[in-house]
Image (cartoon, grey):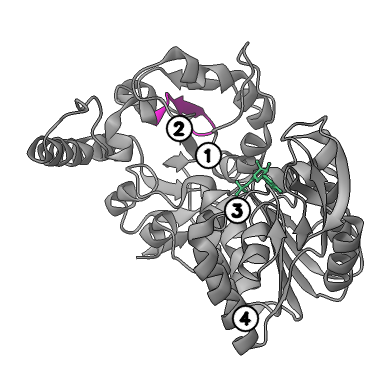
Amino acid sequence: MQQFIDSYDFTGKKAIVRVDFNVPLDENFNITDDTRIRRAMPTLKKVLSSGGAVIIMSHLGRPKKVDPKFSLKHIVGRVSECLGVPVKFADDCMKADELAAGLKPGEALLLENLRFYAEEEGKPRGLAEDASEEEKAAAKKAVKESQKEFTAKLASYADCYINDAFGTAHRAHASTALIAKYFPNDKMFGYLMKAETDAVDYVLKHAERPLTAIIGGSKVSSKLAVLKNLLGVVDNLIIGGGMGYTFIKSQGGHIGDSLHEDELIPDAREILREAEKRGVRIVLSVATKAGDSFTNDANTQIVDIHNIPDGWEGMDASPASLANWKKVIMASKTILWNGPVGVFEFPNFAHGTLEIAKDLAEATAAGAYTLVGGGDSVAAVTQMGYADKVSYVSTGGGALLEAIEGKTLPGVAAILE
Ligand code: AMP
């Protein structure tokens, strides 16, 4: 039975909390963006202030073995600062019995990176490249078997389980999904997880209309399921960035050297047809800022989107496309944005994406509900100083996309079951 963090009695209880503290670190292990740490604080503080103790668990990066580079010890200081109590550290997440048992109400313990163990993800490691199918199957079976012990050990530290890691909720890992089974009557979402799932739910199921989605980024292939699901949900679908060129090519346009996926052309055509059938307005680019090389310092010209010269590639949204999109955005009551509309990493081609961030802030001020997710889109909104001028900034990348695809994420399902 699912519990609720607001009504659960944490007095004298230990809560094991899965957070997503997968924060970026520089070469000296300084945190360059602590958003994910800060966003988990309401949940952790709630437990502490209600007379409970927290055992915090997370992954950091993608280590395939114990690797000090990916140690969570680098972030203990910042977590302590944010939480306002000194956080103890267990340097092996499987050997934290004593530290966990000794926790008093109001105290916090951080476990070392869960992904130092293959059992967290439940995928075999260290298999020889030429391993046979039988060897692969046996290794998979072995890790699944030991994953049970791993999960049981984590569960043994606590009285209740809170999942506040939306960024990892699309993974059915030990700490994000499997552990919930050990707390059939004491499992719940944290505040961040609840806010994230509510935001997606609102957009997909209860949005005030017109509802517009802006989908950018590099490839149609990585967002095909998202585009298809959105066709059944939105009134307008703005498609920008690298993925737009496959659509333009599917209409017979000449896209020069622009990024595209020929094998996705049938899918692009199908999406355009389906949109027409459903009365969804798809708004593609009309012109592009093209560059003569894939570099920040490329020569540029604004060209018609259907007539990009050979030797040139579309790299940022043009003023005409941005003006069209802005009209759609400002006429919408709900707007979802994921993915840059240009090569955002190159400052000379970041303008379009920054403009979209500005438009969303303007639309929010005019009363629209705006949800922004995905690395580059969030970076654009943050860079412009608009993080608190849009309605909701998601901490999820892949998780948000899967939620928009209409899937119930394993981390969510494990609490609801
Ligand atoms: P995604 O991870 O799918 O959201 O894609 C983000 C990436 O799309 C960023 O690295 C951008 O540089 C890239 N991108 C956006 N527009 C273009 C474009 N016109 N040409 C090449 N790459 C692009």
Of 255 and 186, the residue lying toward us: 255
Q: Which one is closest to the eye, mark 2 or mark 3? A: 3
Alpha carbon of mark 3 to alpha carbon of mark 4: how far?
21 Å
Q: Is residue 118 above or below residue 194?
A: above
Question: Which amino acid type is marked by label 2?
Answer: His
User: Which residue occupies 32% across, 36% down?
Assistant: 120
Provide the residue designation for mark 1.
20
The nearer-to-camera label among 1 and 3 is 3
The residue carrying mark 2 is: 59
Looking at the image, tell me whether mark 3 or mark 4 is earlier in sequence order. Answer: 3
Q: CB at mark 3 closer than 8 A to ligand 1?
A: no
Q: What number of labels is visible? A: 4
> Considering only order in the chain, which callout, 1 or 2, is on the residue closer to the N terminus?
1
Q: Who comes first in sequence, dot 2 or dot 4?
A: 2
Residue type, mark 4 in image: Ala
Check disc 1: other Cα within 10 Å, few if <14, some if 14-19, many if 20+. many
| First to last magenta residue range | 104-114
Residue at the front extreme? 310
The residue sitting at 42% across, 54% down in the picture is: 411
Task: Name the disc covering residue 260, or none.
Answer: 3
Mark 4, secondary structure of its residue = helix
Choose top left, top right, bottom left or bottom right for residue 226: bottom right
Q: Nearer the viewer, residue 284 or 181?
A: 284
The Cα atoms of the two marked residues, 4 and 1, are separated by 36 Å
The first of marks 4 and 1 along the sequence is 1
Badge 2 or badge 3: first in the primary sequence: 2
**Observer-nearest of 86 and 363:** 363
